Amino acid sequence: MVSLSEQQERAAPAPVAATVAWRIAAAVPDPEVPVLSIEDLGVLRDVAVDGERVTVTITPTYSGCPAVDAIRDDIVLALTAAGFAEVDVRLTLTPAWTTDWMSDAGKDKLRAYGIAPPTGRAAASGTGPIRLQMAVKCPRCGSLDTKELARFGSTSCKALYECRACLEPFDHFKVH
Ligand SMILES: [Zn+2]
């Protein structure tokens, strides 16, 4: 990706440009949960700079999430505004996104926003003979006495829960 050309003598050195481009792309918010950036979610996978061209690789949370187009547009807009002449956003679906990629900072922000973050590890929730049902904590009062009302909440990425202690309904970001 990094090639020496006359162009690069006046442009920033490629490693610096890649760091700048990563920071700009990383600040793009998730359209569904605007307190989370695509970096918090682990959706941002790679940023490569070649001259004035930047290639951003993302893995959407769910293939059915309508947020993907919005994220793509936001990345292009932000990087174009920062002076990158050509922005290419690529989707990679393998390996599939998992909640394991969500950063701890992202989980904290999710909790503060009132959405129960995913608990446990997707890798550990396989289809063995014994299925461990993780208790979902109410983001409002912290009670574990909660029940799932609907598998699909406000979006396909979230399930709708209700807290039996404070009677508050809340979204739970599903582990997958
Ligand atoms: Zn509660």
Image: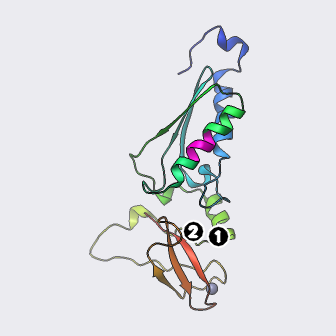
Q: Earlier in the sequence, mark 1 or mark 2?
A: 1
The image quadrant of residue 167 is: bottom right
For the C terminus, the quadrant is bottom left
* CA separation in Å, label 1 and label 2: 6 Å
The residue under the point 61% across, 37% down is 76
Question: Which amino acid type corresponds to the residue marked 2 in the rendered image?
Answer: Pro
115, above or below 77, in the image = below
* Marks 1 & 2, CB-CB < 8 Å contact: yes
Q: Secondary structure at mark 2?
A: loop
Considering every residue shown, the one lying at the far left of the view is: 129
Q: Is residue 107 left or right of residue 146?
A: right
Q: Inspect the magenta stretch and tell me whether residue 73 lies in it.
A: yes
Question: Which amino acid type corresponds to the residue marked 1 in the rendered image?
Answer: Arg
The residue under the point 61% across, 56% down is 31
The residue under the point 47% across, 82% down is 148
Q: Position of residue 144 (x, y in %)?
A: 55, 85
The quadrant where ligand 1 appears is bottom right
Q: Inspect the magenta stretch and tell me whether residue 63 lies in it.
A: no
Q: Position of residue 142 (x, y in %)?
A: 63, 82
The residue identified by callout 2 is 117
Q: Position of residue 122 (x, y in %)?
A: 42, 63
Q: Secondary structure at mark 1?
A: helix
Choose between 159 and 103: the one closer to the eye: 159
44, above or below 33, in the image = above
The residue identified by callout 1 is 111
Which range is magenta? Answer: 71-75
Considering every residue shown, the one lying at the far top of the view is: 6
